Image (tube, coloured by chain):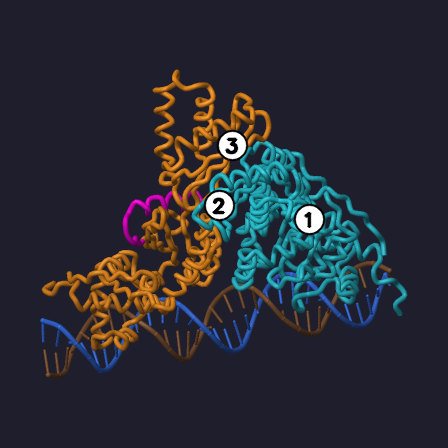
Chain colours: A cyan, B orange, C brown, D blue
Amino acid sequence: MAKRQLLNERSLQLLKSLIERYISDGQPVGSRVLSKDADLNLSPATIRNVMADLEDLGLIHSPHTSAGRVPTVTGYRLFVDTLLTVKPISSPELFRLQEGLLTENTPDVISVASRLLSELSQMAGVVTLPKRELIILRHIEFLPLSNTRMLVIVVTNDQEVHNKIINTSKTFSASELQQATNYLNSKYAGKSLIAIREAILNDLQADREAMNQGMLDAVNMAQAALENGPGKDGYVLSGETNLMEFSELSNMERLKTLFEAFSQKQGVLHLLDQCMKADGVQIFIGEESGYKAFDHCSLITAPYRSATKWSVCWASSGRLAWLMKKLFPLSMSRQNY
Amino acid sequence: MAKRQLLNERSLQLLKSLIERYISDGQPVGSRVLSKDADLNLSPATIRNVMADLEDLGLIHSPHTSAGRVPTVTGYRLFVDTLLTVKPISSPELFRLQEGLLTENTPDVISVASRLLSELSQMAGVVTLPKRELIILRHIEFLPLSNTRMLVIVVTNDQEVHNKIINTSKTFSASELQQATNYLNSKYAGKSLIAIREAILNDLQADREAMNQGMLDAVNMAQAALENGPGKDGYVLSGETNLMEFSELSNMERLKTLFEAFSQKQGVLHLLDQCMKADGVQIFIGEESGYKAFDHCSLITAPYRSATKWSVCWASSGRLAWLMKKLFPLSMSRQNY
DNA sequence: ATTAGCACTCAGCCGACAAGAGTGCTGATA
DNA sequence: TATCAGCACTCTTGTCGGCTGAGTGCTAAT
C-alpha cells in the first residue's frame, strides 16, 4: 500500500508553509487557509491527506479534533535544520546595531548589546559576560582596610575593573603592600589570568627558598585575590517583559518559573556555558535545552568574539523562525528527503 | 437627624477589622463574616448600618451591589495613620536577618539585604545604593589606556570601588600620572566627595598661578573623574516574581508596566530619592506615589544608615498592613475621632 | 492521484436558570 | 433611641443546553 514515500518534496513544502503560517498567526492552521496560502495549488482535501501523513510522522499534531494543525518539536527541528531560509538583516536594522554598539561610549557595551538584541527581536536578549580564563591582567593593587583585611583591585583588558576583599593572616605595612604591588605588576602584567595562576604555583614550588618573605606574601595574596575573584561570570538580561506578550506564556505559573530561572543565574549560566563550546548558531527548541523552566521556550545562541565574549538570545517558542530570519543572515541548505 | 457622630470608636474598630480581614482574604468582606469576626458583638444588620456610614465617608466602597465592602485609598490611609498596630518582629526572623547580614562576607551586602527583604515580606524588595554625596574618598588611581584615554579608579569608604574612563586633551606620561595620583591622594583622601569637589573649585580659582602644571592637570582629571563618576546610583531589586502571586496583578497589562518600570530605573529612583528625605517609615498607598505604573501597588519605605544608605520595600496593595506588622516594630498611637 | 461532497466532532458563544451572597429598608423590641 | 430580625431585591457565579463555525476523515467520482 505505501507506494508513495510519505515525506516528499511537496509535503515538505507544505510543512514549511504550515510552520511559517503558524509562526505569523500563532494559531492552529487548517487545510483551508493552507490551500490558499501555499504556492502549490491543491484543494483542501488533498492538503488534509498530506497533513495526515505528516501527523503520522510526528511532525505536526492537532490540539483537538477540529482545530488546525500545529508543528511538534520534531517538526520544528526538521524545519530549522533543512527548510529554513533566512533573509539577510535589513540595512536600517544593521545600521541601528552599528550605531548603538559603536557610538555608545559607555563602558559596558554588553548591556547595550543585550538591549539591542531584545529590541530587535522583540524577545528577551541575553549576553554573557567574558569568561575569566581569557582575561589579561593589566594592573593589580592592594589597599589596606583593617588589620587583617585588604581590598584587592584587579584591572583587566577591556577596561574592566574587579575588586575583592580578602582576609590575611598577618598584618601588612603600607610599604610591604607597595612592594607587593610593584612586584606583581612588573612580573605578571600583560599575562592572562590562567597563565598567572599556573606561574604562581610554579613559583611557589620552585623558588620557595629563593624568594624573600615579602614576595611570598605578595604571591599568596594575589592567589587569594584571583581565586574566584575577578570576572565572576554572569550575563546581562534585557527585554524580559517582551516574553509576556506571548500566548504560550500567558500561564502565570510558567511565566513565574521562567522569571525565577532568570533571576537565579546558575542554571542559565550552565546552559550557556555548553552553548559556547559550539561554534555557530545553535537552536534549542522546547525541551531540547534540558531545563524544565524553558520547556516552553526556544533558545537561539551564537558565539561572539570581540575580545573573547559570547552572546545568546532567547526566544519564545513558535515565533523563533521569524527571529532567525531577522537576526542571522545565514542561508541554510535545502535538502530533499 | 445626624445626632450621632458618624466616626466613633465603634465604627473605627469595625473599619480596622474590615481592613484586616480584607488583607488576609483578599476578597470583599460582607457584614456576616464581620459580625462573627469582630470583637464587638453586633448583628449583621447593625454592621450594615455602620458600614453604610463608613461608605458615606468614603472610607470603604462596594465593587457592586451585592459584594462585600472593600477599603478605599483614604480608608487605607486612615488605617495606617491611626489604627494600625504592629507586632514586633519575631525572634526567629530577627535572627535570620542578623545571620544573613553579618555572616555573609560577600562584598555587596546590599543584594543580600534586598533578598532578605523580599523573602521575609514575600513581596518585592528594593534597596537603594549609597548616594554619592556622602561617600568618602579613600584612594584614587589613574591608569593609562591609550594616548588620550585613561581609566580612573576611585575607592570609597564601604570598600566600594568605582571606575570611569575619561578622555583627556593632552597625553600624560606614566610619571606625570604617578605624580598626580600621589598629589590627589595626599591632599584629598579621607574627605567626602562633595567637599572635594568644592575644594577643587577653590584651588582652581585661588592658586591657579601658584600651582605647577602637573598639579593643575591632576585636579582637572580628578574633576572629570568625579563628574557623575563613582556611585552611579541605582538599586537592587529582588523577589519581583513574588508580585505575580497577587490577584491585584493578575492582569498581564499591569504586571508588564510594573516590570518595565522596574527595569528602566529612572522613575523608581526619582521616587525613592524623595522618600529618603523623610526620616522614618513612610507608606504610599496606591496612587499616592504619583507614578502610574504603581497605581495598584503600595510602597513602604524606611531609611537605613549603616554608613549612609537607604532602603525601601515594595508591596502589592491590599496586603500592605500585614507587611507592616511583620517588618516594622513600631507601635503607632491610636486616636479617637 | 486528485478532488468534491458529506457526516462527524469539538471549541466557543449565548441565553436561561438556579444558587448564593450581600445589601437596604421596615418594623418590632428593650 | 439603638439594636436587630425579617424580607424583598440585586448582582455575581456557575451550570446546562443549544447553536454555530471550523476543521477533519472518509468515500466516491473524475
Q: Quadrant of residue B19?
A: bottom left
**Magenta part of the protein: which range?**
B263-283
Q: Residue A241: horizontal and vertical position, in percent?
A: 53, 51
Q: Residue A8: horizontal and vertical position, in percent?
A: 84, 57
Query: Label 2, on which residue?
Result: A172
Mark 2: few/some/many CA within 10 Å (<14, 14-19, 20+)? some
Task: Please tell me if label 2 and label 3 are on a single chain.
Answer: no
Q: Which amino acid type is marked by label 2?
A: Phe
Task: Please tell me if label 3 and label 1 are on a single chain.
Answer: no
**Residue D3 shown left or right of residue A161 in the figure:** left
Query: Label 1, on which residue?
Result: A206
Q: Which amino acid type is marked by label 3?
A: Phe
> Distance from label 2 to label 1 (Cα)?
25 Å
Query: Label 3, on which residue?
Result: B142
| Residue A165 in view of the camera | yes
Chain ID of residue with mark 2: A
> Distance from label 2 to label 3 (Cα)?
24 Å
